[in-house]
Image: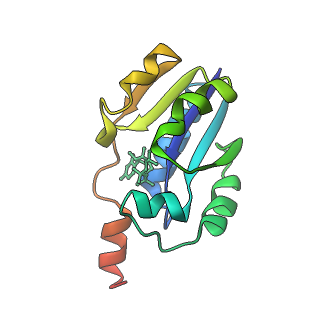
Amino acid sequence: MRVLTYGTFDLLHVGHINILRRARELGDELYVGLSTDEFNAIKHKTSFMSFEDRRVILQAIRYVDKVFPETHWDNKISDVQKYDIDLFVMGSDWEGEFDFLSEYCDVMYLPRTEGVSTTLLKKKKGI
Ligand code: C2G
């Protein structure tokens, strides 16, 4: 059972680890589409860490089996088909946004971890 999720995973924190662990526990493998710096610009999001650093960190997590670049909003259907995905998982802040994928795989939204976010961390550190 192969699981897929996407994200920026900047300044990795416990909220990211929780969703990666829970997603992995729902299957046997976890694939992650990691937002490139260029795609982050499209999401109007700047990450503190480069794509390459975020990729190295993500790849080092025991719950993650494969990391590939997420470059556009509209790659998900082809990614699900290309990687033969059984289950797509995202945090609940995306509830409903990706239901169109249910034609191609199961779709699940897991509750976000409250009280932590990259933005909060940046504010705390005055970055
Ligand atoms: N997340 C969480 N709890 C938090 C923060 C994040 O569960 N406190 C989850 C988000 O819901 C998401 C994942 O961690 O499923 C990655 O979050 P981000 O890196 O902020 O990703 P985002 O910018 O939402 O990009 O195409 C989808 C986008 O690439 C998702």
**Front residue of 114 and 106:** 106
Instruction: Name the quarter where the C terminus is drawn.
Output: bottom left
Q: Is residue 28 shown to the viewer in this render?
A: no
Q: Give the residue at x 42% y 69%.
A: 46
Residue at position x 60%, y 65% from top?
A: 51
| Image quarter of residue 75 | top right
| Residue 37: percent from left, percent from top | 53, 65
Q: Could you tell me which residue is drawn at 29 percent across and 51 percent down?
A: 114
Q: Is residue 78 visible?
A: yes
Q: Nearer the viewer, residue 98 or 39?
A: 39
Q: In the displayed structure, would residue 9 be above or below residue 46?
A: above
How is the rendered protein coloured? rainbow
> Could you tell me residue 65's position as x and y percent?
71, 41
Tell me where residue 96 appears, x and y as whole percent: 30, 29
Which residue occupies the foreground of this view, 21 or 67? 67
Left or right: 77, with 110 as reference point: right
Q: What is the total number of numbered labels drawn onto the structure image?
A: 0
Q: Residue at x 33, y 68 (%)?
A: 119
- The spot of residue 44 in percent (x, y) is 35, 63
Give the answer, above or below, for where 24 lies relative to 99.
below
Residue ranking furthest to the bottom: 126
In this rendering, position of residue 90 left or right of residue 62 = left
Is the N terminus in the top left, top right, bottom left or bottom right quadrant? top right
- Looking at the picture, tell me which residue is in the foreground, 104 or 122: 104
